[in-house]
Amino acid sequence: MSSICRMVTARPIPVSLLPFAEKTGGIKFAAMVPLTKMGPDPGKTVYNILHEYRIHNADVLFREDCSVDQFIDMIEGNRKYGACHGRDGRAG
């Protein structure tokens, strides 16, 4: 299985990102598991990434350990997850 196929068949990142419509509130960050792939200070990393995307008020909840790239993909919403079909049309 190629690396592209593995990326596409990966399941969606279990992260909740709820941007607030209000202009106040800030970023509320919580994780149900230790975030080992986000660097020494995951809260600061998430804060910096959200500010790069001009998201200044949001609730963020991590349900699984994910990387910075996975979090950015989730924010951008540019990844589609589904079955990877071979040349014969079967999943696998």
Image (cartoon, rainbow, N blue to C red):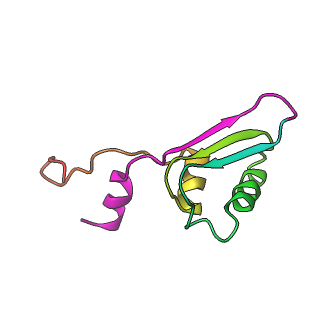
Q: Is the C terminus in the top left, top right, bottom left or bottom right quadrant? A: bottom left
Residue range in magenta is 1-24
| Residue 46 lies within the magenta run | no
Q: On screen, 15 above or below 23?
A: below
Quick one: which residue is furthest to the bottom in this view? 40
Task: Tell me where residue 87 sits by quadrant.
Answer: bottom left
Task: Give the total of numbered labels.
Answer: 0
Task: Tell me where residue 4 sits by quadrant.
Answer: bottom left
Which one is nearer the viewer's eye here, 87 or 83? 83
Q: Position of residue 63 (x, y in %)?
A: 51, 47
Left of 38 or right of it: where is 56? right
Q: Is the N terminus in the top left, top right, bottom left or bottom right quadrant? A: bottom left
Q: Residue at x 34, y 67 (%)?
A: 3
Q: Residue at x 33, y 44 (%)?
A: 82
Quick one: which residue is furthest to the right in this view? 24
Q: Position of residue 56 (x, y in %)?
A: 81, 44
| Residue 5 lies within the magenta run | yes
Q: Position of residue 6 (x, y in %)?
A: 33, 60
Quick one: which residue is furthest to the top in this view? 21
Q: On screen, 13 above or below 45?
A: above
